[in-house]
Image (cartoon, rainbow, N blue to C red):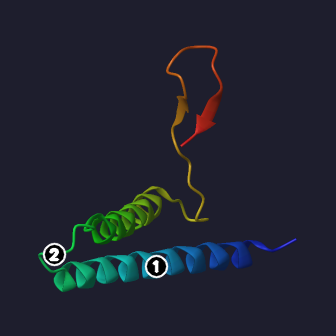
Amino acid sequence: MLNREAIIQNKKFAIDREMLIARSLIEIGLREIQLLDGTNDINFIPLLLISNGYERLLKCILFISQKDDDWVYYGKRYDKMGKKGTISAYC
């Protein structure tokens, strides 16, 4: 079993990797938008890349803002269906 410091290092590495992927997705999407010409009808792929990059980036920002000293995220408890007695999950 990994010790506490190794677990924290793994989480930091995963966040760092996720932020690098988000940055590269945003850069590729912006580059593809610049390369579009007026004859191309398929222009949703660069927008999809940009939105996926921003989504990953925002998830990282939320995780970093809500973490504690042990890099554990304690999300709020919510019901998936919004009713009592349903299956609960952690966000």
User: Which sits in the foreground, 16 or 23?
Assistant: 23
Give the CA separation, mark 1 to mark 2: 30 Å
**Residue 53 on image: x %, y %:** 37, 70
N-terminal label among 1 and 2:
1
| Residue at the right extreme, as displayed | 1
Position of 24 relative to 15 (above/below) = below
Q: Which mark is residue 21?
A: 1
Q: Quadrant of the N terminus?
A: bottom right
Are the residues at dot 1 and dot 2 in contact (C-beta closer than 8 Å)?
no
> Residue 26 at what x, y percent from top left?
32, 76
Viewer-proximal residue among 37 and 76: 37
Q: Amino acid at mark 1?
A: Ile
Q: Secondary structure at mark 2?
A: loop
Q: Amino acid at mark 2?
A: Thr
Asked whether, in this view, residue 2 is left or right of residue 41, the answer is: right
**Does residue 71 sit above or below 19 in this rendering?**
above
Mark 1: secondary structure: helix
Q: Residues within 10 Å of mark 1 (few under 14, many from 20)?
A: some
Is 13 situated left or right of 66 in this image?
Answer: right
Q: Is residue 77 above or below residue 28?
A: above
The local crowd at label 2, few if under 14, some if 14 to 19, many if 20 or more residues have their Cα within 10 Å, is few
Q: Which residue is mark 2?
A: 39
Residue depicted at 56% across the width and 48% down the height: 74
